[in-house]
Amino acid sequence: MAAVPRLSLHVPEPTVRPGGRPDFSHVGVAPAGEARRPPVDVDPAEIRDLAFSLIRVLDEKGDAVGPWAAALTPQQLRQGLRDMLLTRAYDARMVLSQRQGKTSFYIQCLGEEAIACAHRKALEPGDMCFPTYRQQGLLIAAGWPLVDMMCSVFSNEKDRLKGRQLAGLYSAKEAGFFSVSGNLGTQYPQAVGWAMASAIAGDTRIASAWIGDGSTAESDFHAALVFASVYRPPVILNVVNNQWAISSYQGIAGGESTKFAARAHGFGLPSLRVDGNDYLAVYAVSCWAEERARANLGPTLIEWITYRAGAHSTSDDPSKYRPKDEGAAWPLGDPVERLKLHLIRRGEWSEERDRQMRAEVDAEVLEAAREAESYGTLHEGPKPSSASMFEDVYKEMPRHLREQRQQLGV
Amino acid sequence: MARLSMVEAIRDALDCKMAEDTRVVVFGEDVGYFGGVFRCTEGLQRKYGRSRCFDAPINESGIVGVAIGMGVYGLRPVAEIQFADYFYPAYDQIVSEAARLRYRSGGEFSAPIVVRMPCGGGIYGGQTHSQSPEALLTHVCGIKTVIPSNPHDAKGLLIAAIEDDDPVIVLEPKRLYNGPFSGHPDQPSVAWSKHPLGEVPAGRYVVPLGKAAVRREGRAVTVLCYGTMVHVAEAAASETGVDAEILDLRSLIPLDVDAIQASVEKTGRCVIVHEATLTSGFGAELAAQVMERCFYALEAPILRVAGWDTPYPHAEEWDYFPGPERVGRALLEALEA
């Protein structure tokens, strides 16, 4: 009898761990301007290659090149730079606040600012984003007050979420920002449902769904794509691939032998893979997907390639599982520096103005933090009332909760 | 007044709400063209169009997930899970999302959805078409759970559920869809047209969530039950001659503790009956409520009659199902104490 080889299990592992030399060969960095820009009503079958290429606009010199180079005014670009700088300064302050014990936990989006900040500019008032905990840039680019966000981070008396949520799980209906769950992936089918409702109602508003590379493994991601492909509602399906899901790399989420963008192909959906650290590319591709959705042409999946430059959260230490110098080797650079270089190339910016803007946003964040802290922080100062703990479980407080509130004596 | 089956009453409720409120949309597996495997949505797609009544992919998590999104948008989605036994993939969307959305967003967002699920046994459905998962739902704060025992209540509770601003789970005992069931599988089936609670008023009316109904007045012992077990308890009382007071809870959360307290204080004895498995079942909550509220009125230990703590069997269905004989024995035992 012929010998049958014994089976073995394949467990993906990144090519590099701490101590090794960073390797980003899998990113497949293509020259800026190379990827074509199809018409928005293109047959998804004709653009399958765009799930494997990389749409980029800003080249190494800082010039905007190719068919995706959007006509953004210098003022819009400066505003984009400011949104990203403000997001970064806000994050830095909140990480510091966590270290000072003013909140229990924080999640920054360092290095990923362009995605949320530029995407937000492609949406209209009334559109609804269903974000994860790393899209604070959506709020900041929408001009939402920092003080309000900080009050939620500090769980103080002015926290509109009444101290119930961990830091960063904002909710801001007016800003088109759906309540962040903290459970991963659940918002994806909800966004599809919201978009279906908009279509059922004959509305003009669209939804934008957000998920990370790691959470594309969740059943809810696939459920959402099934419903999106069946009913073709006006929804943008964003996948932020920041290379890491806490300590597990994208191979564990399922991206070792294909691209996350290609997940859409089995569902017959158009899909684009995009340089997420390129503010102009993010804006242009978001506008393309937005136009498709608004024109009732259905969903678009976009994989944004970026790098989680910081820790997963304040509870995480990435030096335990990835090389310390990995961020410096990231081939798509820093979104802030790239946009700054572009503005300078266009003669619309200078080092001096840049320094000024950074000082301005730092001052703005500091002032907001002072005000927010005056309303209390997690362990000091005014807090939401204990009685409010029993509110909003139901629209009207039922009898058993009234009785339990009385037992607590509040 | 028209006599309707429970299926027709449910359809009538949906029809009534879809006619008066364009925000109401109905969807689920086989719900559109075909009208649902139990026919509860028959004709609604023809009448209201495909965008208001449609088929859904076989993906319960997706069904409830998109329903939540629709509710957030401002619609009033009524989703059907084909069998309650299939709702577990949607449990995360129900528990972590629908139930907590209002709370976690400080009241900014909510999910006014209805999820209908046929539940319970008595149809030779085996372990995948017979379960009674109500305790998995009543344990979750932020949702309401109701379970009608007849066509009149099915319509009124469903309309109340659709109009409610919180997520409501409507468990529909499928053994009752076409007629009341005493728990004697060998007896000829009875149609709702022969039962007074098959009388269903035309148009809109509500059975308020949180209100129990006394189905049989009595002085000897209180029976707390719901769904199919209401009819089984009635049969047990009549067959044993025990003067039982049968309370049909109708709504599990919110629970009508006043009705429970009033009845148990009157009779001094309490038997709790449900189809679901015994351990950690909703009967345990009911027993605790009775202990906390009526201990000094009790003259006998509280008894529970429930499904055995096994998966729901197929061929052994009638040894598993808590029928009138087991319930009758409990009634007599409660009186002996």
Image: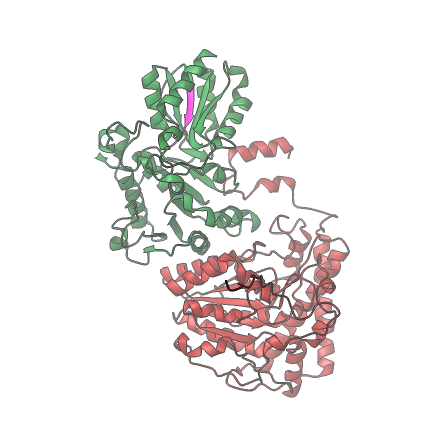
Note the chain letter of the green one: B
Residue at 51% across, 16% down = B298
Q: B322 above or below B52?
A: above
Q: Is residue A155 magenta?
A: no
Q: Nearer the viewer, residue B318 or A300?
A: B318
Location of residue A256 in the rendering, given as x and y in whole percent from the top left corner: 57, 69
Q: Residue furthest right?
A: A100
Q: Name the residue at 32% across, 58% down.
A: B51
In screen coordinates, is B2 left or right of A361? left
> Residue A230: image x %, image y %?
38, 63
- Residue located at (56% from left, 34% from top): A402
For the magenta stretch, what is the residue range?
B222-227
For residue B95, above or below residue A285 = above
Question: Which chain is displayed in red in the rendered image?
Answer: A
**In the picture, which quadrant includes the C terminus of chain A?**
top right
Classify residue A164 as left or right of residue B109: right
Residue A203 visible somewhere in the drawing: no
A116 w.r.t. A77: above or below: above
